[in-house]
Image: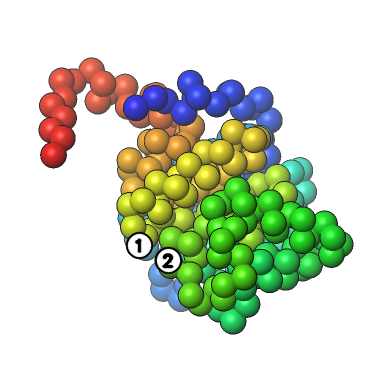
Amino acid sequence: MRNPAEIYPAPDRESLIEVRGLTKRFNEVTALDDISFNLYRGELFGFLGPNGAGKTTTINILTGLSRPDAGTILIGGQDCTKDPKAAQQMIGVVSDESNLYPELSGFANLCFCASLYGMPKNEREERAGELLESFGLKDAAERNFAAYSRGMKRKLTIAAGIIHNPRILFLDEPTTGIDVASARQIRQLIADLHHTGTTIFLTTHYIEEAERLCERIAFIVRGRIVQTDSISNLLQPVQEKKVMVISL
């Protein structure tokens, strides 16, 4: 398996997102405990951890859906700690569950999402058509979202998240609970988006997925980041050992 750094150009090291001392509590539970990290422009950054580690809470805070109890957030140089909507036009969000309208067609859902960002009618219809084509959903464009398979729903949800060409895309466990073929297609879509220069924050609990897609990974456990490093540095101790791979 090739290191993503060999496939994609290295980021220019300019931080697009800076998080310092982020803390969030829910009553007696500390969901995030003084975490800090940064994303470079054009980077695909993995946020890896088990269920309940704090991955979704982090995305909710970074995208303005939740307020932190402490810490600072800078996105594109704008302070989003007190004003969560300061960088809203800059970001796209794909939640861990599809949140589009089941009674609308795939095409109508994309056009509606585009309208929320103020895109003119002609522009949003053209963009929706392009995304349906590139995501392999053209034949299902007029079908109600409720009739889509789980994999198709995930792809359309990603399309809705990038309808306005955001500079930063937040993906919350995009391949969880879908079949192998659909997961493979979605990983390829993510890699293609990264290749075009989109900065991506990806949460997952699949180690193989993070290794295949990401340039750097932060491991979060029980609300604390235990390690952040590049894929090559994280794999170095393992590569020095002999490993037997059995394929069935």
Q: Position of residue 111 (x, y in %)?
A: 73, 66
Distance (Cα) linking label 1 and label 2: 8 Å
Mark 1 in CB contact with mark 2 (< 8 angstroms): yes
Residue at numbered disc 1: 177
Front residue of 125/160: it is: 125
The amino acid pointed to by label 2 is Arg
Q: Residues within 10 Å of mark 2 (few under 14, many from 20)?
A: some
SS class, disc 1: loop
What's the residue at 70%, 58% (across, down)? 128
Residue at x 74% of width, y 58% of height? 88
- Tell me the quarter of the picture where residue 60 sits: bottom right
Report the front residue among 109 and 68. 109
- Please name the residue that numbered disc 2 is placed on: 150
Which class describes the residues within 10 Å of circle 1: few (<14), some (14-19), or many (20+)?
few
Residue at the far top: name it: 240
Q: Is residue 89 left or right of residue 12?
A: right
Query: Residue 17: image x %, image y %?
Result: 65, 43
9 with respect to 114 (left or right)? left
